[in-house]
């Protein structure tokens, strides 16, 4: 019986035909070309990332920026591009407003509508501060502040934005004074 099953299996395999889908030959030509282009783009991206890292390291404020937890090469580069040395902002509130981390009160005549996120903002800078805040949730002081905001009734995203705003204030002071980040002890209780 086993010999018959093996024979039937080989007979069935011989009877099967493979249908060639139209365009298979074209795909065989296009896919390697696309793969080569993708590899080239990835190589250019690696080269650009290395160059950005070199430029950031050569900047005088690089050590100040990267001393703050949650700020790496990409975030530090974004902050340097948009904020520079921070001298163009008179206060930390101005920096937070520029980044879109400060609420904006809408008013018209005697009508005052509540606070809403600012429409005049730098979206890339806001994203950099937001991602930096996400990255520091393992830090005890940042986590305590985040948990405090959650206990106040804020949702996850709102609490992260509050933390991002706080980090913008700290970063402003660091850039203004040229000082490195000094971890603050987590509040008791």
Image: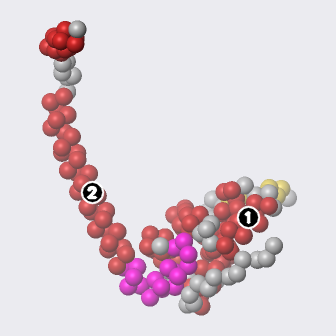
Rendered image: mark on residue 147: 1
Q: Which residue is found at the position 66% from the left and 73% from the top?
A: 140
Dot 1 falls on a residue whose secondary structure is: helix
Question: Residue 44 appears in which quarter of the rendering?
Answer: bottom left
In this rendering, the answer to whether 155 lies above or below 142 is above
Question: Does any portion of residue 170 appear in the rendered image?
Answer: yes
**Disc 1 to disc 2, how far (Cα)?**
42 Å
- As for residue 60 lying within the magenta part, the answer is yes
In this rendering, the answer to whether 137 lies above or below 30 is below
**Left or right side of 20 for 161:** right
Specify few, some or many for label 2: CA neighbours under 10 Å numbering under 14, 14-19, or 20 or more: few
State the count of labels.
2
Which percent across, then down, holds residue 66?
Answer: 50, 79
Rendered image: mark on residue 41: 2
Q: Nearer the viewer, residue 63 or 93?
A: 63
Which percent across, then down, holds residue 184?
Answer: 68, 82
Q: Nearer the viewer, residue 101 or 114?
A: 101
In this rendering, the answer to whether 166 lies above or below 10 is below
Which percent across, then down, holds residue 22?
Answer: 20, 23
Which percent across, then down, holds residue 179?
Answer: 57, 90
**Left or right side of 15 for 39:** right
What's the image's color scheme? secondary structure
Q: Which residue is found at the position 53% from the left and 82% from the top?
A: 67
Q: Return the disc, 1 or 2, that comes first in the chain's sequence.
A: 2
Q: Which residue is found at the position 61% from the left and 68% from the top?
A: 138
Q: Which residue is found at the position 56% from the left and 75% from the top?
A: 69
- The quarter in which the N terminus is drawn is top left
Q: Which range is magenta?
A: 55-71
Dot 2 falls on a residue whose secondary structure is: helix
**Left or right side of 42 for 83:** right
């Amino acid at each position: 019986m086993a010999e018959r099953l093996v024979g039937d299996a080989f007979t069935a395999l011989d009877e099967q035909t493979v249908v060639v889908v139209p365009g298979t030959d074209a795909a065989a030509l296009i896919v390697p070309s696309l793969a080569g282009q993708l590899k080239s783009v990835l190589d250019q991206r690696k080269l650009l990332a290395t160059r950005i890292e070199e430029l950031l390291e050569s900047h005088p404020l690089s050590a100040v920026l990267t001393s703050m937890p949650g700020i790496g090469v990409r975030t530090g580069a974004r902050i340097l591009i948009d904020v520079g040395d921070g001298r163009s902002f008179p206060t930390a509130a101005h920096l937070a407003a520029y980044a879109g981390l400060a609420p904006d009160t809408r008013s018209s005549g005697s009508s005052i509508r509540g606070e809403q996120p600012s429409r005049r903002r730098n979206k890339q800078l806001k994203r950099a501060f937001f991602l930096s805040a996400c990255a520091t949730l393992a830090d005890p002081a940042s986590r305590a502040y985040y948990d405090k905001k959650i206990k106040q009734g804020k949702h996850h995203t709102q609490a992260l934005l509050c933390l991002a705003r706080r980090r913008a204030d700290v970063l402003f002071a660091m850039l203004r004074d040229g000082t490195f980040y000094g971890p603050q002890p987590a509040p008791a209780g």
